[in-house]
Each structure stands twice: as C-alpha cells, then as structure tokens.
Amino acid sequence: MDLSEKLSELEKSILEYLKRQPNSFKWVLGKKVYTKELTIEKFLRDEEFRKMIVKEAVLLAIDLFEKGD
C-alpha cells in the first residue's frame, strides 16, 4: 500500500496543494529553506513534519476564519 493512500483527507489536500505549486516554490522554517520537492518528500516520509504542517494549516484556517467575522 502506497503511503499516500494512508493519509487523512486533510493531509491529501495539503499534498495536492504542494504538488500544484511551481517548481520554484520555496518557504523557510527557522534557518532551513524548503523547496517544493523537499517539502513533498519530507511530508510523505516524516510523520512529525507532516503533523506540524497539518497543525499550522489548521491554525491558519482558523485565523483566517476568525478575521472574516
């Protein structure tokens, strides 16, 4: 079974979002610069990293929702 088949719906949505980004996509966490490829690879292989990304996505969604009031 492919790991992507074990992901939650939210994790699958985040993965699809990452795959749609241009190859030049980069973001910074601390002192580390993540490329699109590195982010996808780490998201699929590192459960702790994946949980952190999901948590931050949820917090951002809540923040945007609250600011919409």
Image (cartoon, helix red, strand yellow):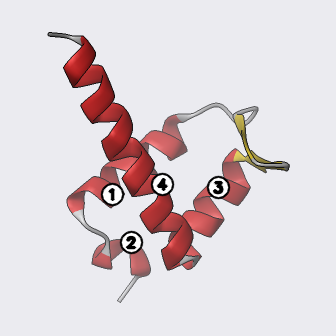
| 4 or 1: tag closer to the N-terminus | 1
In the picture, the quarter occupied by the C terminus is top left
Check contact, mark 3 vs mark 2: CB within 8 A.
no
Disc 3 to disc 2, C-alpha distance? 14 Å
| 3 or 2: tag closer to the N-terminus | 2
Residue 3 image offset from top left, x and y in percent: 41, 80
Disc 4 to disc 1, C-alpha distance? 12 Å
SS of the residue under disc 2: helix
Q: Vertically, is 56 above or below 9? A: above
In the picture, the quarter occupied by the N terminus is bottom left
Check contact, mark 2 vs mark 4: CB within 8 A.
no
Question: Which residue occupies 31% across, 45% down?
Answer: 58
In the rendering, which numbered label is found on residue 40?
A: none
Check contact, mark 4 vs mark 1: CB within 8 A.
no
Which residue is disc 3 drawn over?
Answer: 39
Disc 4 to disc 3, C-alpha distance? 10 Å
Which residue is disc 1 drawn over?
Answer: 12
Identity, as a three-letter code, of the amino acid under mark 3: Thr
| 4 or 3: tag closer to the N-terminus | 3
Disc 2 to disc 4, C-alpha distance? 15 Å
Residue 7 image offset from top left, x and y in percent: 31, 71
SS of the residue under disc 3: helix
Q: Vertically, is 9 above or below 2? A: above
| 3 or 1: tag closer to the N-terminus | 1
